[in-house]
Image: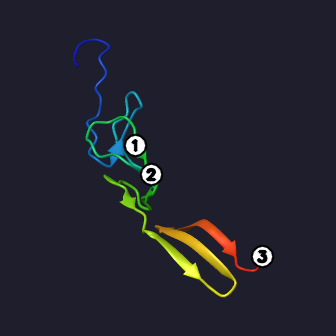
Amino acid sequence: MSGEGAVNCLNCNPGSSENQTGSTKCKACEAGQHQLLAGNETCVDCGAGQYMSGEGAVNCLDCNPVSVYNSSATIAVVQHCGQRILFVLALSKNL
């Protein structure tokens, strides 16, 4: 864009964005977000079953498959997602 009152938008690289008028620097996407395309104004949250622990991600990573832990007292179904462990279901065998 050119001329009086024109705003020059930044063409941010994938993994970053900027939506502030007059900004001269793109910001890396935060942990838990990504941006696949260049030139976008916002980063996108990772979808269900995905994570990203670092900044500046182009893609999110898939969480590990669900695991079943079986002990004498309980059965637990968990999913490892980055540094988090999501407890999907825990059942007591002593009902």
Q: Secondary structure at mark 2?
A: loop
- Residue indicated by mark 2: 30
Q: Position of residue 93 (x, y in %)?
A: 70, 79
Q: Position of residue 70 (x, y in %)?
A: 59, 82
Residue 45 position (above or below residue 90): above
Q: Which residue is mark 1?
A: 43
Label 3 sits on residue: 95
Callout 3 amino acid: Leu
User: Residue extending furthest left?
Assistant: 2
Question: Mark 3 and 1 residues: CB-CB less than 8 Å, in contact?
Answer: no
Most extreme residue toward the top is: 4
Give the secondary structure at mark 1. Answer: loop
Taking the spot 28% from the left edge, 26% from the top edge, the residue there is 8
Decide if residue 74 is on the left or right side of residue 52.
right
Q: Nearer the viewer, residue 31 or 92?
A: 92
Report whether 92 appears left or right of 40.
right
Whichever of callouts 3 and 1 sits on the residue coming sooner in the sequence is 1
- Measure the C-alpha gap from mark 2 to mark 1: 8 Å
Mark 3 and mark 2: span between their CA atoms?
A: 44 Å
Quadrant occupied by the N terminus: top left
